[in-house]
């Protein structure tokens, strides 16, 4: 089986920073694209940032210049460095990965359990 575990969420004041981590474990043959999504109460889950296996990154417009996504393939881990946090960034953040577990298996989407990020005075 495959498991994604997020960490690093918490409470921070506006203008502050947090660094989220997501480690993938289990049977992994190819770890393809990874990304971060977020969901606020009553709203649809939205894409925040993605990073390809070749480390090409993309961001939603609202976080460009403030967030940085990166990955460490040796550790099967993706990170999200969040700077200049604003109250509108408050949400549950979910890690996502596309994984091929073995030869002959399809690429499959996996999700972490989510970690709460709250930006408030």
Image: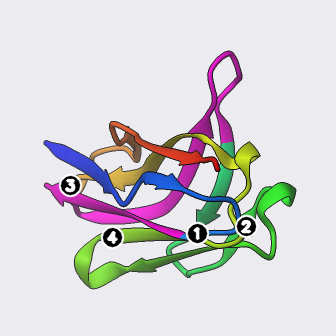
Tag on residue 77?
Answer: 4
Q: Residue at x 23, y 52 (%)?
A: 101
Q: Residue at x 74, y 72 (%)?
A: 66
Q: CA distance from mark 4 to mark 1?
A: 11 Å
Which mark's residue is nearer the viewer, 2 or 3?
2
Instruction: Please name the residue that numbered disc 3 is placed on.
Output: 102
Relative horizontal placement of residue 76, taking residue 19 as reference (left or right) = left
Tell me where residue 39 sits by quadrant.
Answer: top right
The mark that comes first in sequence, 4 or 3, is: 4
Q: Nearer the viewer, residue 94 or 108?
A: 94
Q: CA distance from mark 2 to mark 3?
A: 27 Å
Q: CA distance from mark 4 to mark 2?
A: 17 Å
Category of crowding for the residue at label 4, using alpha-carbon neighbours closer than 10 angstroms: few (below 14), some (14–19), many (at least 20): some
Asked whether disc 3 touches disc 1, contact meaning CB atoms under 8 Å apart, the reply is no
Identify the element where label 2 is drawn: strand
Category of crowding for the residue at label 2, using alpha-carbon neighbours closer than 10 angstroms: few (below 14), some (14–19), many (at least 20): some
Instruction: Please name the residue that numbered disc 1 is placed on.
Output: 51
The stretch in magenta equals 18-46
The mark that comes first in sequence, 4 or 2, is: 2
Q: Quadrant of the N terminus?
A: top left
The mark that comes first in sequence, 4 or 1, is: 1
- x then y, percent, for residue 20: 43, 63
Instruction: Please name the residue that numbered disc 2 is placed on.
Output: 58
Asked whether disc 2 touches disc 3, contact meaning CB atoms under 8 Å apart, the reply is no
Q: Residue at x 23, y 63 (%)?
A: 29
Above or below 78: residue 24 = above
Asked whether disc 1 touches disc 2, contact meaning CB atoms under 8 Å apart, the reply is yes
Q: CA distance from mark 1 to mark 2?
A: 7 Å
């Amino acid at each position: 089986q495959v498991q994604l575990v997020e960490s690093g969420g918490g409470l921070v004041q506006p203008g502050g920073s947090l660094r989220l981590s997501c480690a993938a474990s289990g049977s992994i043959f190819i770890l393809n694209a990874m990304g971060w999504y977020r969901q606020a109460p009553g709203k649809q889950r939205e894409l925040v940032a993605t990073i390809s296996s070749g480390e090409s990154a993309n961001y939603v417009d609202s976080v460009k210049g403030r967030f940085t996504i990166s990955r460490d393939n040796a550790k099967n881990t993706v990170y999200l460095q969040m700077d200049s946090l604003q109250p509108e960034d408050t949400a549950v953040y979910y890690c996502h990965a596309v994984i091929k577990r073995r030869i002959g298996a399809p690429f499959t989407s996996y999700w972490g359990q989510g970690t709460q990020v709250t930006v408030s005075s």
